[in-house]
Image (spheres, coloured by chain):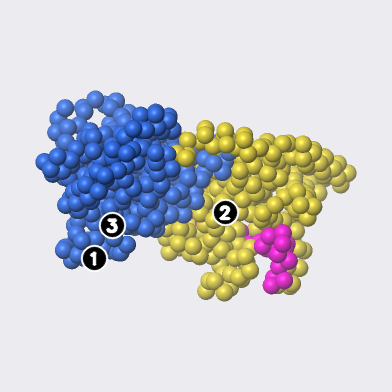
Chain colours: A yellow, B blue
Amino acid sequence: MYSRELLMGIWRTIARIRKFEMRCVKLYRKGKIRGYLHSYVGEEAIAAGACAALAHDDYIVSTHRGHGHCIAKGAEIKYMMAEICGKKDGYCKGFGGSMHIADVTRGNLGANGIVGGGIPLGIGAGMSAKVRGSGQVTVIFFSDGASNNGVFAESLNLAAIWNLPVIFLLENNHYAVSTPIEQSSRSADLYKRAEGYMVSGEAVDGNDPLAVYAAVTRAADRCRRGQGPVLIEAKTYRFGGHHVNDAGAYMSREKLEHYQSRDPLKIARGYLREQETCSEEELDRIEAEIEAEIDAAVEFAEHSPEMTPEEFEHELKSYNLGA
Amino acid sequence: MKEKMFREALNEAIREEMRRDATVIMLGEGIAERGGSYMVTKGLLEEFGAGRVMDTPIAEASFTGLGVGAAITGLRPVVEILFVDFTLLILDQIMNQAAKYRFMTGGRGRVPMVLRTQGGSGNGLAAQHSQSLEALFYHIPGLKVIAPSTPADAKGLLKSAIRDDDPVIFLEHKLLYQTKGPVPDDDDFTIKLGRGDIKRPGRDITIVAWSRMAQLALAAAETLSREGIDAEVVDPRTLVPLDKKLIFASAGKTGKCLIVQEAVRRGGVASDIASLIQENAFPLLKAPVRILAGRNTPIPYNITLEKSCVPQEEDIVKMARDMCNHGLQRQSAVRDSESTMQREVLNVT
């Protein structure tokens, strides 16, 4: 039996991510956001469930599809929105944008523009926690696409030989950009790769936040007992294309309908409704609060200045880039 | 000061920094049990244990990235890549991750990590174990690049690199490990990154060279002095940050500058230094800046051919001699206007 507080927290996180992403798409269409925007819509249960199982000072490593991880780890959405809009008050002063948001103070070591590029960083955080004896756990979010990159195999093996407190959380959304996993792997059950490295591996329903929460809780316990790493494959599906300008025409309609019928937002709300202490009105009211929070974040981002080239020049000097 | 070998100086630097700071760890292939292919890390496992000195599998990209992640989260890793040629397996982790992390996070994240690696030709190791690849790292904003030529510099610079809060690429030449020189015993002996060194003062020509080429340049300067040519040898020691002031001042003083690099000529660091000199010290030059560099070819295995592909001591002597003789005609014409211009140039940073 899960506490009301936990269920409420998870649902709230999913709702915040969903609304944040929907708003970002709108802003993108209006030209307020540039570059690439990879929406996490449909996959929110993974970040929300996983981060609910972590302590404040545990680490996560994120991906190009990283807004959800960032919000779930406790980032302030006004600074996220400002960053995505390229403004000075953003998490990275407008230098990083959507693909590079990091919030080191909350243990989010950052999104990454290179598929798979963050995996070695994550085992490094694990090594650091081990050497310092801090008891911190690291969750590496990565994708089915990244699972075919060499650093996944290397890093899983390194984490295994050194028993690192690292959870490899594979978000299997079935597509590497447009290439289906069935074309890239003999088995679409990617968690089975753990066995070859003598690592504990399991698959969970990635659209069910409590299934993810339970798996990550178990894995984090193992890690803290010195029995890491763990590989968890969360099966999920994007509700759209690879990024905002990709309609996803290649995606399977049948699968999309299946996963949409298992919308993580509805599932999380359902868990709360099962607890009779939560009324529809209360949840609607909280949703309205989240909308207002996002309105305020957009307002903040729009009013935040851009860094001028002169300020940028000054900033660069302080970075000691050897220029 | 005691005479020590280059590899002993490096060992001391790591050992002292590991004693001084418990967050310093070492990772690499065969560095712990075996003590490293060139014995640089000998005895560290015994002193600091397997928790801080780790032999890695042959998984360069991931154990380098592990160093980056550990650096972001509170350690100061020293990662060894056995040959600079193998750094080509780790470029994403170095160039996309380590180099850009501080910048991409708006200055909130830091990567205090050192990547030690070894390069250069001369041991008959052929095309995939003999390269000089400093230009790759020099090219990427966010990396510091060090290439020492003496045991003392190796020690002082490695200690500074480990204490530095940014990613540093530390390039060692395989033929220097056994060379000897005086090394200060002081635990706090460090050399500030970005400070070059005049290895030999001279009046007639400036020879800029780093790593093993600085040693060849010094030997060449002795030969030249017997012919009456007084060469100044400037070793920048760190390529990023580069001690431009020192280089411009020397080139401005002698009016002639030869840059020697072992790496292939095309797209090299020497070309960049040459362009900086001519943009900043042109009025003081009596001759075109020249470059002596490796040929644009992979390194051949055969020893005669290997030597023919990289600058040798006699090549430096010959080119410096040519420059000095050729420049005689122009010298008197330029000398009059020299003093005012010299002052202007020396103010350039």
**Element type where label 1 sits in the image:** loop
Above or below, comparing residue B241 to residue B28 in the picture: above
What is the CA distance from the residue labelled 1 to the residue labelled 2?
A: 38 Å
Which percent across, then down, holds residue B270?
Answer: 35, 49
Label 2 or label 3, whichever lies nearer to me, is: 3
B82 on left or right of A187: left
Image coordinates of residue A14 in percent, x first then y, are: 72, 49
Disc 3 crowd, CA 10 A, few/some/many (<14, 14-19, 20+): many
Residue B212 appears in view: no
Residue B99 on image: x %, y %: 47, 45
Labels 1, 3: front one:
3
Viewer-proximal residue, B117 or B315?
A: B315
Residue A113: mark: 2
Q: Main secondary structure of the magenta part?
A: loop
Circles 1, 2 touching at the beta carbon (< 8 Å): no
What residue is disc 1 on? B300
Residue B41 quadrant? top left
- Name which residue type carries label 3: Gly
- Indicate whether B195 appears above or below B222: above
The answer to whether B218 appears left or right of A254 in the picture is: left
Residue at position x 81%, y 41% in the image = A295
* Disc 2 crowd, CA 10 A, few/some/many (<14, 14-19, 20+): some
Q: Which mark is residue B294?
A: 3
The mark found on residue B78 in the picture is none
Identify the amino acid type marked 2.
Gly
Residue depicted at x 51% and y 54%: A117
Name the kind of residue labelled 1 in the image.
Pro
Q: Secondary structure at mark 2?
A: loop
The Cα–Cα distance between marks 2 and 3, rounded to whole angstroms, is 36 Å
Chain bearing tag 1 is B
Image point 86% across, 45% down: which residue? A284
- The span picked out in magenta is A224-251
